Image (tube, rainbow, N blue to C red):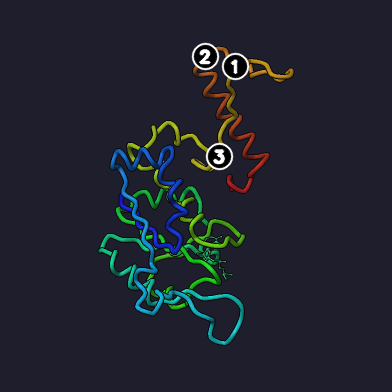
Amino acid sequence: MRIDILTLFPNMFIGFLQESIIKRALEKKIIEINIVNFRDFSKLNNSQVDDTPYGGGSGMVLMVEPLVEAIESLKTKESKVILMCPQGKTYTEKKAYQLREETHLILVCGHYEGFDERIREFVDEEISIGDYILTGGEIPAMAIVDSVVRLVDGVIKKESYEEESFTNNLLDYPTYTKPREFGGLKVPDVLLSGNHEEIKNWRKKEQIKKTEKKRKDLMS
Ligand SMILES: C[S@@+](CC[C@H](N)C(=O)[O-])C[C@H]1O[C@@H](n2cnc3c(N)ncnc32)[C@H](O)[C@@H]1O
């Protein structure tokens, strides 16, 4: 899978690409990630990419032309172009599973007051990571890349994500590690029993109990 990220702030991705699972996936060449500064596609003086809004109002608006130039320079028949936008559809684990099937993602990060509305004619979809406003689309793009890449074959073990929260519409089961007792709080006996069938059943029951208590909406 190849992912191109269009941004005005490429340095924000330095740490993100150089640590942990993403770093390993890049090293193993399971994925390729390119950070593209769309300022490079401006034809104006001083590489300008934003301007004041028509009709007045606060903040600067990202111009459509440099963004479209950047998108068109990267796009192939297989590309899916996604706008990071608080007005888009809210991102979910189900969406992450859909995106892992793609061969080429182009993620477009906004900033300032947002995009010239006409950009919407040049993208396939808009994704929001939640009902709150961030200063830019870089953190949403990282959230999407992180959640998709871990699901790509060969990046982490299948068992590591198949029973996680939101898979099968349930939250994850409770997990414990050493010590067996901490401040009077004990690890449930069943987990020390060595009986794999009982452990499996207990975990399933706990998943259902937890989801009913914390996120009943997932089960409907
Ligand atoms: C300050 S926001 C602009 C918000 C815009 N004026 C609005 O009210 O819809 C700047 C950019 O950050 C990104 N952004 C902010 N919050 C986001 C969210 N919840 N999900 C996805 N992208 C977001 C988008 O790329 C957006 O264009």
Mark 3 and mark 1: Cα distance apart in space: 21 Å
**Precedes in sequence: disc 3 or disc 1:** 3
Amino acid type, mark 3: Leu
CA distance separating discs 1 and 2: 8 Å
Q: Earlier in the sequence, mark 2 or mark 3?
A: 3
Looking at the image, the residue that sits furthest to the front is 46
Q: Residue furthest top?
A: 193
Secondary structure under the numbered disc 2 in the rendered image: loop
- Where does the image place residue 168, in percent across and percent down from the top left? 50, 41
Residue 67, label in figure: none
- Of the image marks 1 and 2, the number of the one nearer the N terminus: 1
Task: Please give the name of the residue rendered at 37% of the width and 63% of the height, measured from the top-left corner.
Answer: 81
Against 27, is 113 above or below?
below
In front: 23, or 215?
Answer: 23
Q: Which secondary structure lies at badge 1?
A: helix
Residue 162, x across and y down, in percent: 45, 36
Q: Are marks 1 and 2 in contact (CB under 8 Å)?
A: yes
Residue neighbourhood size for the residue with mark 2, other residues' Cα within 10 Å, grouped as few (<14), some (14–19), many (≥20): few
Residue 218, image x, y percentages = 58, 46
Which label sits on residue 170?
Answer: 3
Q: Which mark is residue 195?
A: 2
Q: Between residues 172 and 35, which one lies in front from this camera angle?
A: 35
- Residue under label 1: 190
SS assignment at label 3: loop
**Which image quarter has ligand 1?**
bottom right
Are the residues tagged 3 and 1 within 8 Å (C-beta)?
A: no
